[in-house]
Amino acid sequence: MEHQIPPAVADFLQRHGLSYQTVFHPQVHTVEEAMPYWQQLPGLHTKNLFLKDAKGKLFVVTCLAGRSLDMKKLPEALNSKKLSFGKPELMWECLQTQPGALGPLSMLADTEHQVTFAIDEALWNADFVTCHPMVNTCTVSMAVPDLKAALKHMGVEPVVLALEPQGAEAA
């Protein structure tokens, strides 16, 4: 596969004057596979879930790469009911993104605003975050103010999730 950021993503970022650093790498499908390449970039690393609730509402949840999400508590945080993983075909239809390549920049393809974007508060308050730009053959690092500006330009109003700290035990 050719190593480049999808033109739609690169054009969007350039048009809005948003800065980013890129590292190209072989195709990766998991956080573990991507970690050796991410180490070259500044920022907190992310994992991303494409979820669907019982009523068909769609979500992209971006959280710290090492975070374990409580799938029983997450629906309440998203003002939703029972969540399950969305099918790859539905992710492609809504976000033009394959599994393993999902990230905040995938929201660029959601021109009909069918998907709710939620982000871990730890990422929202960080200096830099890394994510895939709709392909899993490269990773970008963006300053969080640039990520926030990108979402705003996309018309995305994120849900900021106050998740339990890493390793916190339920009381």
Image (spheres, rainbow, N blue to C red):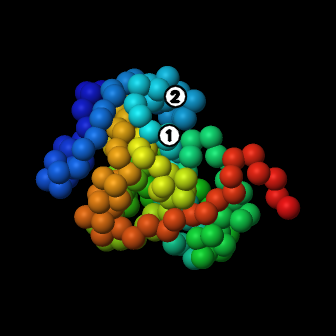
On the picture, is 8 further left or further right than 80?
A: left
Quarter of the figure with residue 156: bottom left
At horizontal 41% and vertical 34% (from top left) the residue drawn is: 42
Mark 1–mark 2 contact, CB under 8 Å? yes
Splitting the image into 4 quarters, where does residue 41 fall? Answer: top left
Q: Is residue 169 left or right of residue 56?
A: right
Where in the figure is residue 99, as x and y percent of width and height?
Answer: 47, 44
Residue 143 is marked as: none
Q: Is residue 28 above or below residue 128?
A: above
Q: Quadrant of the C terminus?
A: bottom right
Say what amino acid the circle numbered 2 marks: Met
* Label 1 vs 2, first from the N-terminus: 2
Q: Is residue 133 visible?
A: yes
Q: Is residue 144 above or below residue 4?
A: below
Residue 45, disc = 1
Question: Label 1: few (<14), some or many (≥20) within 10 Å?
Answer: many
- Which residue is rendered at x = 34% and y = 44% of the image? 142
**Residue topped by disc 2:** 35
Q: Residue furthest left?
A: 15
